[in-house]
Amino acid sequence: MAIDRITDLAAFVRVSDARSFTIAAQQLGLSRSAVGKCVVRLEDSLGVRLLHRTTRSVTLTHEGEAFYARCVRVLADLEEIELDMASRTEQPRGRLRLDLPVSFGRLHVLPVLHRFMEMWPEVVVNVTFTDRYVDLIEEGIDVAIRIGGEEDSQLVGRTLARHRLVTCASPEYLASHDVPMTPADLGDHSCLAFTHGGRPTEWRFRSQVPADGAETAVNEQFVRVHGRFCTSNSESLRDAVLAGYGIGQLATFLIGADLRAGRLQPILEDHALDGPPIRVVYPTGRHLSPKVRHFIDLLAEIWRPEPPWDEAADVSRNSPTVP
């Protein structure tokens, strides 16, 4: 069909949606007669009747229903092309709504966001901090950073960094206690737990360790830990481990500098296993606005192939990076 029939397609879809030539004409800013001529031209061109018309109603014929579905897709594709082309030249502007994990967001996303706002002064940012997984669509969030979580068909996700976990303790604690050699030895220690949803999270380990460079299948081992202190705030958990309360399993994004300075010492390194990856998620849609696309691209640029907090940790340098 010739490109000059686009107006006819749009008129037909509006009439079909509104079940009225008069309402469709008002929506399109055309006369009722002009809209009627658009539909007649389509019917003449196709050689079929698309609409049943009476003085009281307008309904789709069987052929009209099939043609309507194709028209909707064609017009949507055209709109997507137009928006995509526009976004390539548009500068980010408007309000960007972000949802971030409390500690990770404050420590590592805010510095990137500061740089982003300097680059794009027409962007206004609203940030919420929470460790629960909010409904992005219901709460009107453009972008969220998540560590783990279930897959959601309504969201698009992109992995930005590994979530490296280190079991560790202060030198003072290890000097006065036997150093655990296996995850099973943790039962004899005070292990400080992070609570999520009111329950302590289990610690994850590699249950089979390769020997002499041989490849061995990696199996996850989950260990329930008990100790004198648990908290729902990861930064307070770090403080408790630094104070010598016991052993913790903490992310390198939180303790990278402490590991490098020797304030914390890693243990059970042969059993270390990464946590679920750090991802950016946003609602499924046919088009990403420039503000969202540029913000995600900036995160990826700064955090890959290796994020700055893992460089500070200075551990497992030869581990594979995020694919």
Image (cartoon, helix red, strand yellow):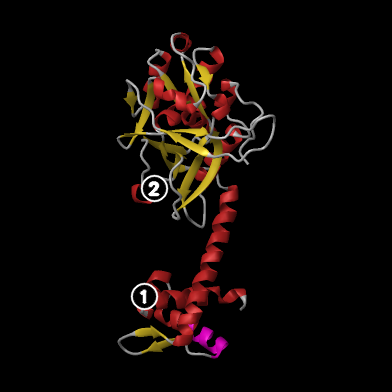
Alpha carbon distance from label 2 to label 1: 31 Å
Q: Residue at x 52, y 75 (%)?
A: 70
Which quarter of the rendering shows the N terminus? bottom right
The secondary structure that dominates the magenta segment is helix
- Tell me the residue that label 1 is attached to: 18
What kind of element bears circle 2? Answer: helix
Q: Which numbered disc covers residue 69? A: none
Residue furthest to the right in view is 213
For the question of whether residue 244 can be seen, the reply is yes
**Of residues 320 and 179, the one drawn nearer to the viewer in this rendering:** 179
The verdict on residue 43 being magenta is yes
What kind of element bears circle 1? Answer: helix
Q: Position of residue 249 (x, y in %)?
A: 45, 26
**Of residues 188 and 91, the one drawn nearer to the viewer in this rendering:** 188
Q: Is residue 154 left or right of residue 90?
A: left
Q: Is residue 170 left or right of residue 228?
A: right
The verdict on residue 93 being magenta is no
Q: Position of residue 153 (x, y in %)?
A: 45, 55
Q: Residue at x 35, y 26 (%)?
A: 226
Q: Position of residue 88 (x, y in %)?
A: 60, 49
Q: Residue at x 43, y 70 (%)?
A: 28
The number of callouts visible is 2
Q: Read off the magenta span.
A: 39-47
- Tell me the residue that label 2 is attached to: 136
Residue 284's place in the image compared with 187, above or below, is below
Q: Amino acid at mark 2?
A: Leu
Q: Nearer the viewer, mark 2 or mark 1?
A: 2
**Residues packed near mark 2 inside 10 Å, few (<14), some (14 to 19) or many (20 plus):** some
| Residue 191 occupies quadrant | top left
Which quarter of the rendering shows the C terminus? top right
